[in-house]
Amino acid sequence: MIKVENLHKHFGKLEVLKGISTNIQDGEVVAVIGPSGSGKSTFLRCINLLELPTDGRIMINGQDITDKSTNIMKVRQNVGMVFQHFHLFPHKTALQNLTYAPMKVKGLSKSEAEKTGLELLEKVGLSAKAHEYPNRLSGGQKQRVAIARALAMQPEVMLFDEPTSALDPEMVKEVLDVMKNLAHTGMTMAIVTHEMGFAREVADRVLFLDGGVLVEDSSPEEFFSNPKSERARDFLQKMI
Amino acid sequence: MNLDFQQFIPSLPYILKGIGVTLQIVSMAGILGFVLGIILSFFKISKFKFLGWIADAYTSVFRGTPLVLQLMLIYYGSPQLIGYKIDPSTAAVLSFGLNSAAYISEIIRAGILAVDKGQSEAAMALGVPYRPAMMDIILPQAMKNILPALMNEFITLTKESAIVTVIGVTDVMRRAYIVGGEKFSYFEPILIAGLIYYIMVMVLTVLGKGIERRMRRSD
């Protein structure tokens, strides 16, 4: 379980997160929604400490990851991240992208890492592309490899930072389908997204952020059909 | 213009032997410069400001003074610095290596900074520590981009190595000069030396292109 308590993040004088508190249960899929600049990406990046919180606490399975003595690398091994722009390693093949971290960080042998790597590529429907370099893949394929790469570390939590925002429209579905399958396996997921349909269908809960404040924390049905706040209503109106 | 290459044919093997001397100095200086250049570039991007200052001061001094001066300083200064005179070719390797490290560190620093920040973030997000992320993910990509600039530096080094002549290392240049002195005719042997340098640079260029092609496999 992820427990976020009074999370603050400043960039110099700019206060991006103004005290966010929420919980994410094991196996829960949470969609983080909000206008640009609302702090949703920063919120996500705090959970694997790509951004260090200025104040507040984040507990993952009872461990305070914001504590100074926490091994950040160990935390990140347990929290997978998928980026908007994929960030695959361009000088490694798809399979090498998957096997690098497990071999380097977890000390898996090459054959072990390749075995799990190939299984994961199979799961995201890209076995045939195992030995291709990222440049030879389409955007949707790259993002599916990136998801598989994060899964290769066998994380307990997966974070998605606008995973479909950089994709051509016809490639969005293939990535969302992979994420949907992942959600069905019981993975704990936090997804920053603009795909309202997907959030509504797959998410167990919606967090609506605006101006660094968690404005709404509710079920998708409630959020989309009957948003409590003016700002959420306004936002949803502009989305459609 | 009356060129007489005939009379230099017996001296040709002597001049050609200088290629080995030149190549030895250049390759050893190149390795020294490259290794030291990588270390200095790490200093420059380090979060410890102090290391950055050291590396910047280093670059500033070696870029700000003539190479021939550095060469003579090391060669003629060695008795006062370390108590005995060092071998001229050692002085050459040292000064060329230290000098090109200054340039190479700038090239590598720029190359590292040009790699998309997302690459190190992706490595971090996978729990990969800084050092392996740097070595396995960032540097290989940086190297690919800076290869032409690095090749340029090695080519410069090859040509500039001719100044070892001033401290008496018998490289291609020096030998051509000696042969010219024997025959009281400098024009032809120096033309021959020029051709030799040109061919060496061409070989380096072709080699560089080959490496670049191999590294672009993933494109």
Image: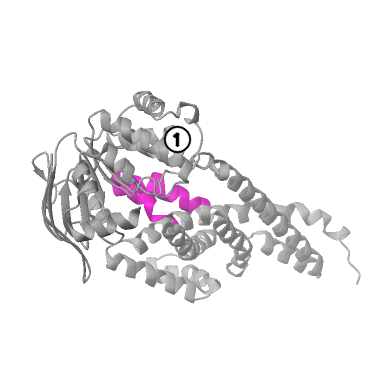
Q: Which is nearer the eye, B207 or A24?
A: A24
> Who's the residue at 34% across and 44% down the image?
B132
Q: Main secondary structure of the magenta part?
A: helix
Please state the chain letter of the residue tagged with numbered disc 1 in the rendered image. Answer: A
Where residue B147 appears, as percent x and y from the top left, is 55, 54
Residue A100 shows in this picture? no
- The residue segment tinted magenta is B115-144
User: What color scheme is it?
Assistant: one colour
Q: Which is nearer the eye, B6 or A67?
A: A67
With respect to residue A190, does B162 lie above or below? Answer: below
Question: What number of labels is visible?
Answer: 1
Where residue B107 appears, as percent x and y from the top left, is 48, 62
> Who's the residue at 59% across and 46% down the image?
B211
Magenta stretch holds residue B124: yes
> Who's the residue at 18% across and 45% down the image?
A222
Q: In the current view of this chain or complex, which residue is farthest to the front?
A: A225
Magenta stretch holds residue B118: yes
Residue A82 falls left or right of residue A92: left
Q: Which is nearer the eye, B180 or B44?
A: B44
Residue B164 falls left or right of residue B14: left
Where residue B51 appears, as percent x and y from the top left, is 31, 65
Packing grade of label 1 (10 A; few <14, some 14-19, many >=20) is many
> Who's the residue at 68% across and 63% down the image?
B173
Residue B219 falls left or right of residue A167: right
Residue A116 shows in this picture? yes
With respect to residue B102, does A91 lie above or below? Answer: above
Residue topped by disc 1: A94
Residue at disc 1, secondary structure: helix
Amino acid on which disc 1 is placed: Ala
Residue A126 falls left or right of residue A76: right
Quarter placement of the N terminus of chain B: bottom right
With respect to residue B121, does B79 lie above or below? Answer: below
